[in-house]
Amino acid sequence: MRTGTRISKQKQLFLKLIPMTESVNKHEEFLPVTRKKWICKKKIAKTHKHILDNKCLAEDFQSFKNKFIVKLNKQCNDMSTCDYFAQAIKVLEQSLREINTEAQNIEKVICFGLGPFTRHVQALHQLVFVICVQRLYKVKECLYFDPIFNETERKILHELNCFVMSENCEAKYEVEQPTLFYMPHCPGPLTNNLLWCNWEPKKLQNVILINNSFESITSNQPERILRTDLSYILDIQPYVKEFIIEDDYELQSIFNDLSVHAFPRFNLPPPDSDFWQKKDAPVYTDDSILTLNFATLKL
Ligand SMILES: C[S@@+](CC[C@H](N)C(=O)[O-])C[C@H]1O[C@@H](n2cnc3c(N)ncnc32)[C@H](O)[C@@H]1O
């Protein structure tokens, strides 16, 4: 629904059309309606209908957005008091202690690949979770990106004080302060890109990542495939500290197989090691995995 921009264009058109409508009305008592005028009136009537339709859409959108946010806040209350959340926070705290951030705080939250949360129940519960984390840690900077978001979803996120990135950075996002990346069930190449982009101890130690367990990713696929497409996940696997978040959530297939991954500096190879040699950005056998194409096909 791109009602916002369409309405303003239609409004401009409407204002331009008013004098014409009036002049038609003024003379219609005296002049017979010719076919040309009849067509013109019909066109105007259609435009009016369109404007009204758009107005309804705008009102529908406002009421949908308001209802959605009320529902989301209620779900946030439920989430923040449920066992799953308590346990996930305990695990997150443990990982923050490992990386030894000064105030053991999270400065930024970045969420990639959440999915279409107004149309997809899994994504909705994941949004509720990450919003609760943001509120608990009073995180001011929260950024989201998923090529599948529609205008409604972008506006709702904006309403929730979350910034939606305008460009697809394919998770090549560099960090300098403790940042929580929430990427539940995201395509592996996104995680691989994130690691590539922060491939030095100084940066990597600021990455706290919640996504599918590295342990399961690396043990469930042949090394040959991992080496081709997920080499950064494969290489960092011996040095990552992984904390499993037990999935006892009331609904299944939402938070399954997720872990917090931390990269404490003392656990990583020394900064001058060849291990950190910077290479070109990864290229994937199937690039569509990082595009809208993939997003549309897989959901
Ligand atoms: C398997 S779905 C997971 C959706 C949801 N989080 C879930 O658990 O059901 C992968 C998501 O990654 C998104 N995605 C694909 N390319 C992306 C990119 N370049 N940046 C961010 N998200 C992307 C897709 O649109 C899709 O929503």
Image (cartoon, rainbow, N blue to C red):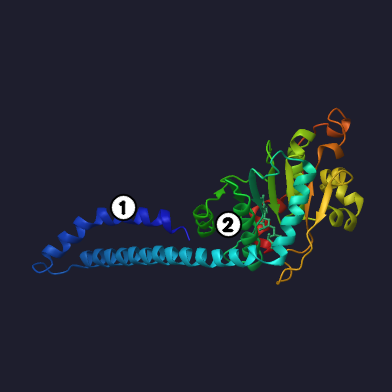
In depth, the one of 51 and 33 nearer the eye is 51
Residue placed farthest to the left in the image? 30
Q: Earlier in the sequence, mark 1 or mark 2?
A: 1
State how far apart marks 1 and 2 are (Cα). 28 Å
In depth, the one of 199 and 190 nearer the eye is 199
- Is 95 rendered above or below residue 32? above
In this image, 103 relative to 131: left or right?
Answer: right
Percent x, y of residue 121: 63, 68
In this image, 270 relative to 100: left or right?
Answer: right
Q: Find disc 1 in the rendering and name its residue.
A: 12
Check disc 1: other Cα within 10 Å, few if <14, some if 14-19, many if 20+: few
Percent x, y of residue 171: 69, 45
Q: Which secondary structure lies at badge 2?
A: loop
Q: Is residue 185 visible?
A: no
**Could you tell me if the residues under marks 1 and 2 are in contact, i.e. CB atoms within 8 Å?**
no
The quarter of the image holding the C terminus is: bottom right
Quadrant in the picture for residue 141: top right
Percent x, y of residue 180: 69, 47
Percent x, y of residue 209: 74, 49
Q: Which secondary structure lies at badge 1?
A: helix
Q: Nearer the viewer, mark 1 or mark 2?
A: 2
- Is 224 rendered above or below residue 270? below
Three-letter amino acid code at disc 1? Answer: Gln
Q: Find disc 2 in the rendering and name its residue.
A: 149
